[in-house]
Image (cartoon, rainbow, N blue to C red):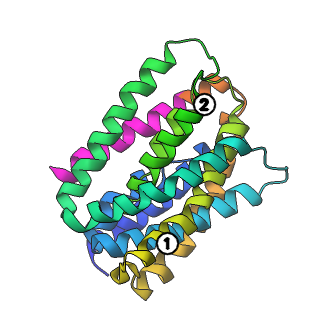
Amino acid sequence: MSLIAVAAGVAVLSGAALQSAVGFGFALVCAPLLYAALSPAEAIGLMIVLALEVNLLTLLGERRRPVPSRPDVRAVVAWSLPGALAGVAVLRSLDAVALQLLVTVGVLGALAVNLRAERRPAAPSTHPRAGRALAGLASGALNTSTSTGGPPVVLLLRGRGLPPATVRDTLLATFIGFTPVTALALVLTGTEDAIPPWWSVAVYVPLTALGAVVGGRGFAHLSASRRRYERALTAVLLLAVVAGLASVL
């Protein structure tokens, strides 16, 4: 196994822990190194498998009933299909470096909006339907082009005064809904090279499960304070920017 594959394993473990603790961050941490270890299409296919694993383990593995915001989940997942089809075109037209630049620019924009929202008092969105549609389209496109569709959904949910458990469960349920949409978009567009190699599944699936267990303990600490949890969301976005810039440079 190459050194980059080992480093990708560390990223998978760390990303799964972040996803379980905060509700997103898996692909943002894993994508740069998995793109380096595999082809872009193979990396997309592998992250679909691993993301579904960590989201299911986190959402269903705790001794409580999940409390996602169902209207947000339904609308965002529905709108992600046309975005996913557009994202396949991006995946085919850009090389790995350009794809990573796209991810970094998108996360920078998300971080700027996120920090601005942090300074405003929590209030419900006055245009929930438009916000859900935009989040779904953007996430769908990012999922099939870079597998990093989390930030648009995070921005949709931030600043609405929702409890940490609701935000986290909504993110996880939405990402689970993204899985068949992204896979369908890849099938409809004939992207057959998105099947990951067998060794990557055998190595990274157990690491993902371990990360989900570790991250679940972290959420127990973060959920005690909504401000603490939202700061953790912002920190994960910042980490994604740093990782993306480092991989490009």
Query: What percent of the width, then of the height, locates residue 127?
Result: 57, 26
Assess whether residue 110 is covered by the magenta stretch.
no
> Mark 2 and mark 1 in contact (Cβ < 8 Å)?
no
Identified at 63% across, 24% down, the residue is 160
Label 1 crowd (10 A; few <14 / some 14-19 / many >=20): some
- Percent from the top left, x then y, of residue 245? 23, 45
Q: Is residue 111 visible?
A: yes
Residue, x 62% and y 60% (percent of image)? 176
The amino acid sitting under disc 1 is: Ala
Amino acid type, label 2: Pro
Q: Is residue 47 above or below residue 143?
A: below
Tell me: 173 left or right of 107. Answer: right
Tell me: residue 209, above or below residue 242: below
**Observer-nearest residue: 220 or 109?**
109
Labels 1 and 2: the sequence-earlier one? 2
Residue 239 within the magenta-colored segment of the rendering = yes
- Kindly give the residue lying farthest to the bottom in the view shown: 198
Whether residue 215 is visible to the viewer of this picture, yes or no, is no
Q: Is residue 33 left or right of residue 130?
A: left
Q: Which residue is mark 1?
A: 183
Please tell me which residue is depicted at 50% across the width and 83% down the height of the picture: 202
Residue 164 image label: none
Residue that carries the numbered disc 2 in the rendered image:
128
Stretch in magenta? 231-249
Q: In which quadrant of the rendered image does the N terminus lie?
A: bottom left
Q: CA distance from mark 1 to mark 2?
A: 27 Å
Residue 124: quarter of image: top right
SS state under label 2: helix
Q: Nearer the viewer, mark 1 or mark 2?
A: 2
> Where does residue 45 sit, x and y in percent of width and height?
43, 73
